[in-house]
Amino acid sequence: MIFVTRKTHFNAAHRLHNPNRSDDWNSETYGKCNYPNWHGHNYIIEVTVAGSPDPETGYVIDLGDLKSIINEKVLEPCDHRNLNIDVPFLEGVIPTSENLVKAFYDQLKDEVEAAASEGSILYSVKLFETERNIAEYCPYITIG
Ligand code: NI
């Protein structure tokens, strides 16, 4: 099994807020991340494809193709946007890093796997909200 990763970045604004709970609950739960007038992050996203190299090209996936798919499916909709209100595929999603990695994975899966070598999978999506705060979604790992 070979893992190939494309790392890229985007900037976006968001606010953590659950509209089904009270303002006090939101403030206690999310702290500064609940401030009403948004805040921004310099997000870094890592997209990892796993598989065997195609015998003709030697690629698990052409990284130029992977770059284009990430641009189309994640960066164009999200970069310099407000994740709470501007991005159709995030409608109704509280934009925590956890929810974002799952949504980004679902956005990318079909096109990435169609572009990759036979039998390859979109293995994981990892999102750095800050240098120290990171979420990763990998549906192939289960606990328990
Ligand atoms: Ni934030």
Image (tube, grey):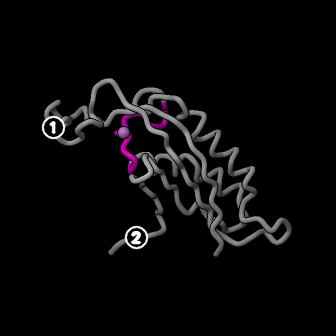
The amino acid type, in three-letter code, at marker 2 is Thr
Q: Please identify the quarter of the rendering in which residue 79 is found.
A: top right
Q: What range is drawn magenta here? A: 87-98
Closer to the camera: disc 1 or disc 2? Answer: 1
Q: Residue 96 in magenta?
A: yes
Mark 2, secondary structure of its residue: loop
Q: Residue at x 59, y 38 (%)?
A: 75
Q: Is mark 1 within 8 Å of ligand 1?
A: no
Residue 24 vs 122, above or below: the answer is above
> Dot 1: few (<14), some (14–19), or many (≥20) neighbours within 10 Å?
few
Q: Residue 99 in magenta?
A: no
Q: Which mark is residue 25?
A: 1
Residue 144 vs 35, above or below: the answer is below
Q: Residue at x 62, y 60 (%)?
A: 5
Residue under label 2, please give it.
Answer: 142
Q: Is residue 50 left or right of residue 43?
A: right
Task: Decide which of 12, 98 is in the foreground and name it.
Answer: 12
- Estimate the spatial distance between the alpha carbons at disc 1 and disc 2, rounded to whole Å: 31 Å
Q: Residue at x 44, y 70 (%)?
A: 141
Mark 1, secondary structure of its residue: helix
Q: Please identify the quarter of the rendering in which residue 82 is found.
A: top left
Return the x and y of residue 115 as percentages of the image width and height.
72, 55
